[in-house]
Image (cartoon, rainbow, N blue to C red):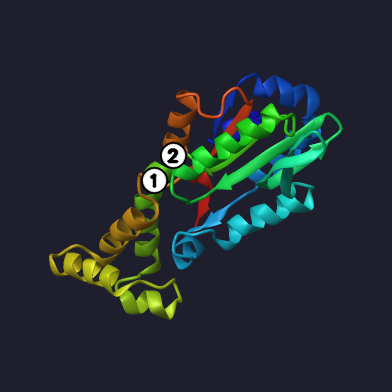
Amino acid sequence: MLSDLRAAGFDILAKNHAEAILAHDFPRQIEELETVLRDFRISLRELVGGGGGESGQTQRMRHELSDLGWGKHRFAVQTVVDGREREAVSHEVDHVRFAANGSLALEIEWNNKDPFFDRDLENFHRLHALSAISLGVIVTRGRSMQDAMLRRITGWMRDEGLTDEDDLDRLGLGSRTAAQKRNVARQVARGVPFPEAFSKKFVADKFGPATTHWAKLEDRVARGVGNPCPLLLIGLPETILTA
C-alpha cells in the first residue's frame, strides 16, 4: 500500500496504526487517493503566476477528489442535557470520504501559515474521539519540494529567458507589490541576475519556513499533536513540478 507514492519520492508517514486501518477497512478509498496523487503535477509557470497560492492544478486535485466522493463536509456536534441543547459546534473538513466501514477526513495544506496544521490535527483528534472519522489525512509540500523550490523556480525563469519585470508582466505572471519590485531591483543593481533576485524574494515571501510544509507537519506529529487519531501524512515531492 502506498508503494507507488513512496517510489515516486512522496514523503509518507503513518501514525497510530493508520496503514493497518486503511489496508483492512479502506482499500478502495486509499487506492483512489493514491491514483489522484500519483498523476498530479504542478506547473512552475502557473505556480509563479498564481503568486504561490493554490494553482489551477491544486484546484484540479480538489476537483478530482470531489468527483470520487471526497467532498467537503461539515460535522455538526450537539450536546443535549435533559432534552435541552446546551452546546452546538461544527467542524468543517475540505474532503471527507464516507465508506461502509467508516470515514476518512483529508485536508490539503498547500501554502498556509503553519498553525493551520494545529487546526487540522486538533480537528481530527476531536472528530475521531467522537467516532465521526476513522482516520485523518494531510497532504502538504514535501521535504524535497521545499528544498528545491528556489532552485527550480530560478532554473525555470532562466530557461524561459525572463530577465526583467516587463517579461513577467507580458506573460501575466502574477502581481507584485511595489515593495517587492524595489527589493528585486536593489538586488539586480548589485549585480544579481534577475531570475535569482526575483526567485529569492518570491520563495522567501511565499514558501518560507513559517508556511505549511513537511518539516513543520512532522514536528507537530512528533510532539503528539492530534494523538491518538490515526494519521496518514503525505508530502508532495519535487518531481511533480513541471515547466
Q: Which residue is mark 2?
A: 144
Q: Which residue is mark 1?
A: 148
Q: Are marks 2 and 1 in contact (CB under 8 Å)?
A: yes
Q: Residues within 10 Å of mark 1 (few under 14, many from 20)?
A: some
Q: Quadrant of residue 10?
A: top right
The percent coordinates of residue 34 (x first, y second) are: 68, 38
Three-letter code, disc 2: Ser
Q: Is residue 34 visible?
A: no
Residue 6 horizontal side relative to residue 73, left or right:
left
Q: Residue at x 48, y 51 (%)?
A: 111
Give the answer, above or below, for where 51 lies relative to 136: below
Three-letter code, disc 1: Ala
In the rendered structure, find residue 173 and report the number of the disc placed on it: none
Q: Residue at x 73, y 26 (%)?
A: 22
Q: Residue at x 80, y 25 (%)?
A: 25
Q: Quadrant of residue 123?
A: top right
Q: Residues within 10 Å of mark 2 (few under 14, many from 20)?
A: some
Q: Is residue 26 visible?
A: yes
Q: Secondary structure at mark 1?
A: helix
Q: Secondary structure at mark 2?
A: helix
User: Cα distance, mark 2 to mark 1?
Assistant: 6 Å
Residue 32 horizontal side relative to residue 160, left or right:
right
